[in-house]
Amino acid sequence: MSEVVLEARHMKKIYNYNTSNEFEALHDINFQVFKGDFVAIMGPSGSGKSTFINNISTIDLPTAGKVFINQKEVRSMSSNEIGRFRYQNLGFIFQDFNLLDTHTMFENIAMPLSLAHVGKDEIYSRVNELAEQMDIAHLLNKYPNECSGGQRQRAAICRALINRPHIIVADEPTGNLDSKNSSELMKILQKLNSEDGVTIVMVTHDPLITSYSSRLVYIKDGNIETVLDKGDLTQDEYF
Ligand code: ADP
């Protein structure tokens, strides 16, 4: 494991920059995510976890410092190039699923492919194949509010995976799930990581969820306080 896929160098984020409300949420972050990594980000509420994950994954841009994706500096890329990188490489999973209630489960899952102008037949077969794997194929014509939380999160995962991303960025993906659905989701992520080599960067506040990762980053007051490698520990020992 050596190829760096995401990197922050002296990354700093100041909200409300140049106003009287300036707030420095990240101070001087240096961090590398390697190909095949499974990184869990933990830390107290308000410590900067979401800011970290958003800024290292092109959702937001840092106020100072540099972010590299596939060794290319984000600021040197055009917005089209960043968009293409996102489409080709990244899948996002959020706590509140972010599904559109006015669209069916099928339409929600297909969204990234529709935006990328993938052909109808290809969309149909890819959505059905993934939905089958995630056990929600029978729900594709339903609307999200007709489905359970676990089913909606599975649809959100299908949407995150539909473009076959190399990197999954997940912010509290189990935050709205019960423990059974949480552990099922973690098994899905762990399988994607170990069998398909998908890189995962995930924010969570739950040590049990973290125990599925291979590296823990602990953020406190806008700084990385500790990085812990799972190494040869078993999941129980790591937990
Ligand atoms: P965490 O994910 O660890 O809970 P966040 O990254 O969401 O923390 O927030 C870190 C700090 O930055 C918090 O103090 C939060 O209030 C502040 N913050 C987050 N987003 C914004 C924003 N858009 N504008 C101003 N302050 C923000």
Image (tube, rainbow, N blue to C red):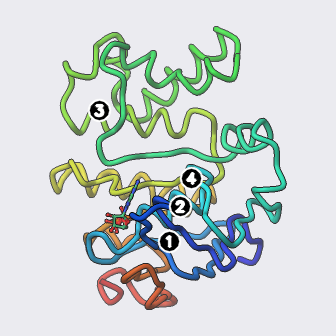
Tell me the mark number nearer the camera, choosing from 2 and 4.
4
Q: Quadrant of the C terminus?
A: bottom left
Question: x and y percent of residue 39 in the render?
Answer: 50, 71
Q: What amino acid type is highlighted by mark number 2?
A: Ile
Q: What amino acid type is highlighted by mark number 3?
A: Arg
Mark 1–mark 2 CB contact (< 8 Å): yes
Tell me the mark number nearer the camera, choosing from 3 and 4.
4
Q: Secondary structure at mark 1?
A: strand
How packed is label 4: few (under 14 Cα within 10 Å), some, or many (20 or more)?
few
- Ligand 1's quadrant is bottom left
Tell me which corner region of the image, top left, top right, bottom left or bottom right, holds residue 41.
bottom left
Label 4 beta carbon less than 8 Å to ligand 1: no
Image: 200 above or below 77: below
Res. 152 mark: 3
Disc 1 target residue: 39
Disc 2 target residue: 200
Q: Quadrant of the N terminus?
A: bottom right
Pick the front one: 80 or 118: 80
Q: How many marks?
A: 4
Tell me which corner region of the image, top left, top right, bottom left or bottom right, holds residue 233.
bottom left
Tell me the mark number nearer the camera, choosing from 1 and 4.
4
Q: What amino acid type is highlighted by mark number 4?
A: Asp
Residue at x 40% of width, y 36% of height: 156
CA separation, marks 3 and 2?
20 Å
Disc 4 target residue: 60
How packed is label 1: few (under 14 Cα within 10 Å), some, or many (20 or more)?
many
